[in-house]
Amino acid sequence: MIKTDILIIGAGPTGLFAVFEAGLLKLRCHIIDALAQPGGQLAEIYPKKPIFDIPGFPEISAQGLVDNLMEQIAPFEPGFTLGERADTLEKLEDGTFIVTTNKGTKHHAKAVAIAGGLGSFEPRKPQIPNLIDFEGKGVDYMIKEPEEFRGKKVVLAGGGDSALDWSIHLAEIAEELTLVHRRREFRGALDSVEKVRELRDQGKINLITPAEIEALNGNGNLDSVLIRKKDEAAEEFKIETDYFIPLFGLSPKLGPLADWGLEIEKNAIKVNNSLDYQTNIPGVYAIGDINTYPGKLKLILCGFHEATLMCQSVYSRIYPNKRYVMKYTTVAGVTGFDGNKKEAPKAVVEAI
């Protein structure tokens, strides 16, 4: 039986940062993740993807952010159960919890924080008749190694942040880059939209809107795509390409979490965002992309904020008769569970 103060389900950025915030409160954490390594989607799906909205980092790679978070939480020595899925939740009479994985590993925790990102997921695929024929032969649904596309002709499809960010990044790598979106308007950050349009004006991106990919062509491997404009002319034309990458997001599935008695709305876990991101089960929290509440934004930054308030709530839950004062590590340093002070320019909490 693994015992801990907070059991965190999900080793993505939100789950990792929760370890740091809990450590400042002298709360121990253990993390369960179905993947074999920490980092969640950032490490598994797009480790080289640039991220632009982390405070203090004008640009950082997804894997770079994971590496920094792992270094940040090192003083607090969290435990990890990797390569196992959290399957069942049992609440005991004393208000603590037993979480058992699909491999039978049991965890006893005073609080549970679900930070499972989008849960289990698979890419959303466009409705193209022969799409499956070219999977792995020019059709990919994610970008792990951008250098693979250096000097190649690449067609991206999508209108969200991922499609915009990768368009900006690959514009300097690919020989020819085309971005196709079914609408004239984009769903991503306005700054990214403006940058894509600037690159279009510079001739670095072939931007085609409103339009859709109608068919894929090739003898074994992909060699071209058929595009249909969605305007009055409904023009169809062919573009030669080495790769077609539809970036329409991920289709999330909660998996076993859906059977835990949690209140679910649109495949996400409802939480009380006016206080501490607690679910309908007292002592069970949901933070990051897996939760939902009025005004929810699925941003890493928001997950960090939610993790911070969650840890404060857990501290009050475990130590209802204690209060604490906030100091800063520029003065006090960070003290790990071994009692040794580790330098890190972050806040520290002292219970009194």
Image (cartoon, helix red, strand yellow):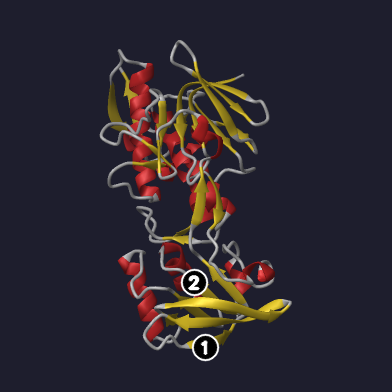
Residue type pointed to by label 2: Ala
- Are there few (<14), some (14-19), or many (20+) residues within 10 Å of tag 2? many
For the point 51% across and 61% down, which residue is it?
49
For the point 44% across and 72% down, which residue is it?
168
Between disc 1 and disc 2, whose residue precedes? 2
Residue at the outermost right position:
220
Residue at the outermost top position:
93
- Where is residue 95, by image quadrant? top left
Q: Is residue 34 left or right of residue 55?
A: right
Q: Can residue 208 be spotted in the picture?
A: yes
- Are there few (<14), some (14-19), or many (20+) residues within 10 Å of tag 1? few
Say if 40 sits above or below 249 in the image.
above
Report the label total: 2
- Where is residue 56, by image quadrant? bottom left
Residue identifier under label 1? 237
Residue type pointed to by label 1: Phe
Q: In this view of the protein, which residue sits in the foreground, 130 or 248?
A: 130
Q: In this view of the protein, which residue sits in the foreground, 62 or 217?
A: 217
Q: Is residue 136 left or right of residue 245?
A: right
Q: Position of residue 30 (x, y in %)?
A: 53, 29
Which of the two discs, 1 and 2, sits closer to the camera? 1
| SS for callout 1 | strand
Q: Position of residue 172 (x, y in %)?
A: 50, 77
Say if 163 sits above or below 282 in the image.
below
| SS for callout 2 | strand
